[in-house]
């Protein structure tokens, strides 16, 4: 997915009165684009770490998604002097005892691609029947304020891991995460549809409320 720096930094009209800008504590362009779309009509300038090339690299070494989200948001709020938003997403697969969990982004190794990760997942689930491929995405989002306060919210999406990938949209595990009530994988959903139902959408609807309060 292509994304220009300017496309994330354009203010838009809304009713926000006090808060004027926020920085997304991520270097993942796919994630930044998705979050920007979820927050795009707040009337707040949405910046990313592309605007702060010297910002510290925050190591995601927490044992939980909450720990990682809070660590990233706090570090970037401290560095930029702006409110910072960070999230971390885990994929919990029942048949694998909750793996990959918080390690979802690096499941197949530190330099793994999206495809490397979901292919490893499919290999591990080979031969396991559909009814035992139950999974859930959990997104934890944190908003850190320059004053030092942090607020945390969570969004969850239940589904099953498909036998094979399907769809061309999205990123990460989207091609293999099947949502039964929709009859599609997340990668088969148009971006605007995914942004109504996803785990990240559910978390960021609460983030929107925080940012509106300013």
Image: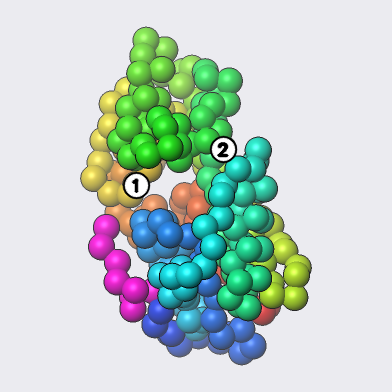
Q: For the residue labelled by badge 1, is the local secondary structure a helix, a strand or a loop?
A: loop
Quadrant housing residue 86: bottom right
Question: Which residue lies under the disc numbered 2?
Answer: 102
Image coords of residue 108 (percent x, y): 40, 30
* Residue indicated by mark 1: 171
Residue 43, x across and y down, in percent: 50, 83
Residue 142 visible: yes
Q: Which residue in the rendered view is the most extreme toward the top?
A: 127
Q: Local crowd at mark 1 within 10 Å, few (<14), some, or many (≥20)?
A: some
x, y percent for residue 40: 44, 74
- Quick check: 197 left or right of 168? right
Q: Residue 210: tell me if it is visible.
A: no
The verdict on residue 143 being magenta is no
Q: Which residue does the image show at 36% across and 31% down from the upper left? A: 118
Q: Residue at x 48, y 60 (%)?
A: 26
Nearer to the camera, 210 or 103: 103
The mark that comes first in sequence, 2 or 1, is 2
Coloring scheme used? rainbow
Per the rendering, the mark at residue 208 is none
Distance from disc 2 to disc 1, alpha carbons, whole Å, reads: 17 Å
Q: Nearer the viewer, residue 103 or 151?
A: 103
Residue at left 45%, top 40%? 105
Which image quarter holds the C terminus? Answer: bottom right
Residue 25, relative to residue 52: is it above or below?
Answer: above
| Crowd tier of the residue under label 2, counting other residues whose Cα lies within 10 Å: few below 14, some 14–19, many 20 or above | many
Q: Quadrant of residue 3?
A: bottom left
Q: Nearer the viewer, mark 2 or mark 1?
A: 2
The x and y percentages for residue 172 are: 38, 43
The residues colored magenta run: 1-8
Number of marks present in the image shown: 2
Is residue 190 shown above or below 80?
Answer: above
Which quadrant would the N terminus be assigned to in this image?
bottom left
């Amino acid at each position: 997915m292509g994304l220009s720096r300017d496309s994330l930094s354009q203010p838009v009209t809304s009713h926000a009165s006090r808060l004027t800008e926020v920085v997304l504590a991520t270097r993942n362009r796919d994630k930044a684009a998705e979050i920007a779309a979820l927050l795009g009509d707040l009337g707040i300038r949405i910046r990313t770490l592309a605007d702060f090339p010297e910002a510290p690299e925050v190591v995601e070494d927490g044992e939980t998604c909450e720990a990682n989200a809070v660590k990233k948001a706090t570090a970037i709020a401290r560095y930029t002097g702006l409110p910072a938003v960070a999230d971390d997403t885990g994929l919990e697969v029942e048949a694998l005892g909750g793996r990959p969990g918080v390690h979802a982004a690096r499941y197949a190794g530190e330099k793994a691609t999206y495809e490397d990760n979901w292919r490893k997942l499919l290999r591990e689930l080979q031969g396991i029947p559909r009814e035992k491929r139950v999974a859930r995405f959990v997104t934890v989002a944190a908003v850190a304020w320059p004053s030092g306060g942090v607020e945390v919210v969570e969004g969850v999406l239940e589904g099953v891991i498909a036998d094979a990938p399907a769809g061309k949209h999205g990123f990460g595990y989207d091609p293999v995460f099947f949502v039964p009530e929709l009859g599609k994988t997340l990668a088969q959903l148009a971006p605007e549809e995914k942004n109504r139902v996803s785990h990240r959408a559910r978390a960021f609807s609460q983030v929107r409320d925080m940012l509106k309060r300013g």
